Image: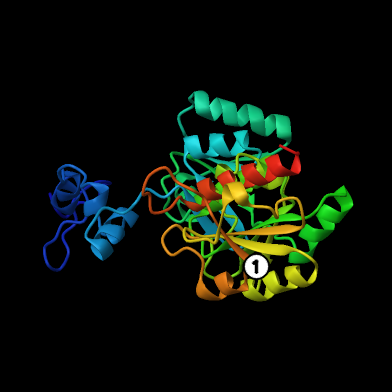
Amino acid sequence: MPGNSSRRGAIKKTGKGNPTAGSGGRVKRGLEGRGPTPKAKDREGHVAYQGRKRTGRPAPRRTAARTGDADWIAGRNSVVEALRASMPVTAVYVAEGAERDGRLREVFRVAADRGVSLLEVPRAELDRLTEGAVHQGLAARVPAYEYAHPDELLARAKASGEPPLVVALDSVTDPRNLGAVVRSAAGFGAHGVLVPERRSAGMTAAAWKTSAGAAARLPVAQATNLTRQLKSYQEAGCMVVGLAADGDVTLPRFDLATGPLVLVVGSEGGGLSRLVAETCDQLLSIPMAHDLESLNAGVAASVALYAVSQRRAGG
């Protein structure tokens, strides 16, 4: 009898009369369309929704994340740029079913040439590893940066037989500025870059990329206390000179370039902090043709380092 049959696929009535098998009831409702998928910014579980909820604006597109003792670079262009910049990538992760395009093929080729591990993982696992960053099916793992000791920078100069040249950053929080300073410091013959442990940019994936490979050649040291470390450099015979818009000496008249030198660069907005400025032996300004408030840290460091390198070369 219909409804009471024990045949496979027949409808069985429950105590409340709700069908649990066959082609009707809840199964039918489950097959009904639910409309178009909401945008990411409208889905409560999505990182874009969370960012919009906190700020009232769409969440920024993240291409990097940190988990434990490693940095993650996410996104096809970002991974390609990281490999081109000779970043110390230890593994490349590809989502299962990711579309093979020119960027992915380049990553495969470079990874094979360098002996970098290439792993295929479920897309959900890649989401978890990159903490929700937009990875486009591709991410790279980079080990946490190993900072040098501040004294190693002077030792490096001594080994080269050159007067020390160190660039110190004060309250520079943008990792791209740090990367640009590292690149300029390497290009103009500095022996290292010094950053504070706190309230400062660190050597993240973004800094590595901006340095365009220079971070692999030039050490970056961390100081527990920047002012104390600058005084230690002074005791070792270095002159500490800070870049400041209201400096006592302009760059063309700078006469300390050929000796042991620590060049301190402050943030674009606040410049040098009070204690650091008071510690400096001299404040140096870069003359400008127009009333421009300040240069960012990367540009200011490049201009000053170029002038120092010219003086040291006898130019």
Q: Horizontal and vertical percent for residue 88?
A: 67, 45
- Mark 1 belongs to which amino acid? Asp
Q: Residue at x 59, y 31 (%)?
A: 107
| Nearest to the observer: residue 173 or residue 45 | 173
**In this view, which residue lies farthest toward the front?**
253
Tell me which corner region of the image, top left, top right, bottom left or bottom right, holds residue 86. top right
Query: Counting other residues with Cα less than 10 Å from the Cα at mark 1, is it few (<14), some (14-19), or many (20 or more)?
Result: few
Q: What x and y, as percent, mark residue 203?
A: 60, 55
Residue 156, compared with residue 230, is above or below; it is above
Can residue 21 be seen at all in this image of the molecule?
A: yes
- Residue lying at 75% horizontally and 39% vertically, measured from the top left: 314
Residue pointed to by mark 1: 281
Name the foreground residue: 256 vs 109: 256
Residue 141 % position (x, y) = 60, 48
The image quadrant that residue 290 belongs to is: top left
Q: Quadrant of residue 164?
A: bottom right
